[in-house]
Image (tube, rainbow, N blue to C red):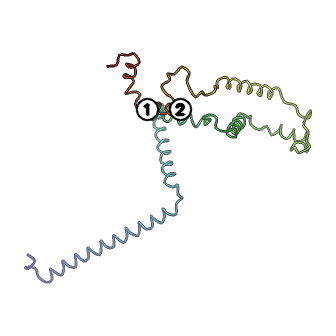
Amino acid sequence: MDSNKTAAEKLAERKARLLDLHKKRQEARTDNHQEVVAEDARKKLPKNWEARKRQAEWILADDKARADAKAAGKDYERLKLLEVSAVDAERIEKKKKRKDNPDLGFSTYEAQTARQYTRLVKSMPPRDMEKYERQKEELGDAFYGGPHTTLHARTKDTPGAINKMVNDLEQQIERRKKYSRRRIYNDDADVDFINERNSKFNKKLDRFYGEHTAEIKQNLERGTAI
C-alpha cells in the first residue's frame, strides 16, 4: 500500500518517473529532428525522384530475375509472359501497336504531310559524309541553294535512288487500293429508322440492349413471337 511507503521511497519513485519522462522527451526530440532533416532532404530532391526511384528498383529487380533465369537455363521472356493475364497481354499488345504505328487515319492534310515526311526521313539511309563533301566541292556555292540557283544537269541520280523512288511509289499505289470511301449507310443493312436522328437512337439502343433483345427481334421477324 502507498500509505505504508516511506517518504524516501515515494521520492525515489517520483524521481524514477521523472527520469523516464525526460528520456521519452529526449527520444521524441531526436525522432522529430530526424524527421525534419529527412523531410528537408526530400524537398531538395527532383520532383520526379519517386518515379525515377521506382523505375531504378524495377530495372534492378528485372536484371536480377533475368540473370537468375539465365543461370537456371530458362527463357526469361517466357517466364514473364506466364505471369501476365490474357487481358493485360491484349492491352499491352494494343498499346505497342499504337506506339509502333501512330497513324490512326486521316485527320488533316497538315498531319498527313507530317506523317509522310517522318516516314520518308526514317527510310533514308545513313549519312555518307564522303559523298556529302564531294558534292559540296563539285557544286560550290550552288550546294546551299538560293533564289537563282539551278541544279539541272549538274546532279545525277544514282540507279539505286531511282529504284527506291519507284518502289516507294508502287507501295503508295498498293496502299491506296486498300482504301475505300467510308459510307454513311450500309446498303445491305435493314432499314429500321425514319431519319438520321432516329438511326443514331436505334444504334445506341442496340449497343446497350442488343444482346438481350436479339431473340425477341428474331421471333418478330419470323412471325413466331408470342
Q: Nearer the viewer, residue 179 or 39?
A: 179
Q: Is residue 74 visible?
A: no
Which residue is depicted at the point 71% across and 24% down? 173
What residue is shown at x 48% (from left), y 41% (from top)?
62
Percent x, y of residue 20: 26, 73
> Which amino acid type corresponds to the residue marked 2 in the rendered image?
Glu
Q: Residue at x 38, y 16 (%)?
A: 223
Residue at mark 1: 205
Judged from the image, the secondary structure of the residue bearing numbered disc 1 is: helix
Seen as rendered, the residue at the extreme front is: 194
Q: CA distance from mark 2 to mark 1?
A: 14 Å
| Position of 165 relative to 135 (above/below) | above
Quarter location, residue 27: bottom left
Q: Position of residue 157 (x, y in %)?
A: 85, 30
The image quarter in which residue 187 lies: top right
Which residue extends farthest bottom? 7
Image position, residue 49 (x, y; %): 51, 55
- Circle nearer the viewer, 2 or 1: 2
Question: Which disc is residue 196 wearing?
Answer: 2
Q: Residue at x 39, y 27 (%)?
A: 211
Identify the image quadrant of the N terminus: bottom left
